[in-house]
Amino acid sequence: MRGDGVDELLTNFEAELADMTSQDMRQSQQRQHSYGAGYYNFACRVPQLKNSEVTCWKWPNWQSCKQTCIYGHGIGTQRGTMRSLTFSCRNSENAWKPHRIADCQRKSSYCKEF
């Protein structure tokens, strides 16, 4: 149907693509089994939050996260009230300080324990 050259190029491309995909999968599996792999695999886990923006920084023995809650921001109100908290956790202690990370509430109170 197509010329031999086109078929050969497609076959070579498909083989290279399959090789790259399997190599990526092997690297991903190796990362999953190492300490600290991925965003949520540190000793101090960051919970899934629905109403918060969380930015984390990781170091070998500890991590810190900044949680931001925004209230009153919308189409009619361009500026809202922004509140931030910073949390830290040593991997050996496995406890967030000053307290557990909790989701922002939509009401006037700041955070809700989950």
Image: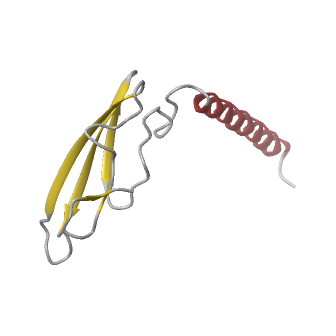
Q: Position of residue 86 (x, y in %)?
A: 23, 41
Residue sticking out furthest to the top:
60
| Above or below, comparing residue 23 to residue 46 in the picture | above
Label tally: 0
| Above or below, comparing residue 72 to residue 67 in the picture | below
Residue under the point 52% across and 31% down: 37
**Residue 49 located left or right of residue 82:** right
**Residue 101 located left or right of residue 73:** right
Q: Quadrant of residue 77?
A: bottom left
From the viewer's side, name the closer residue of 99 and 39.
99
Image quarter of the C terminus: bottom left
Image quarter of the N terminus: bottom right
From the viewer's side, name the closer residue of 103 and 71.
103
Residue under the point 65% across and 33% down: 29
Q: Position of residue 83 (x, y in %)?
A: 17, 54
Q: Position of residue 107 (x, y in %)?
A: 23, 70
Q: Position of residue 88 (x, y in %)?
A: 29, 34
**Residue 105 located left or right of residue 60:** left
Residue under the point 23% across and 57% down: 69
Residue under the point 83% across and 47% down: 3
| Above or below, comparing residue 96 to residue 69 in the picture | above
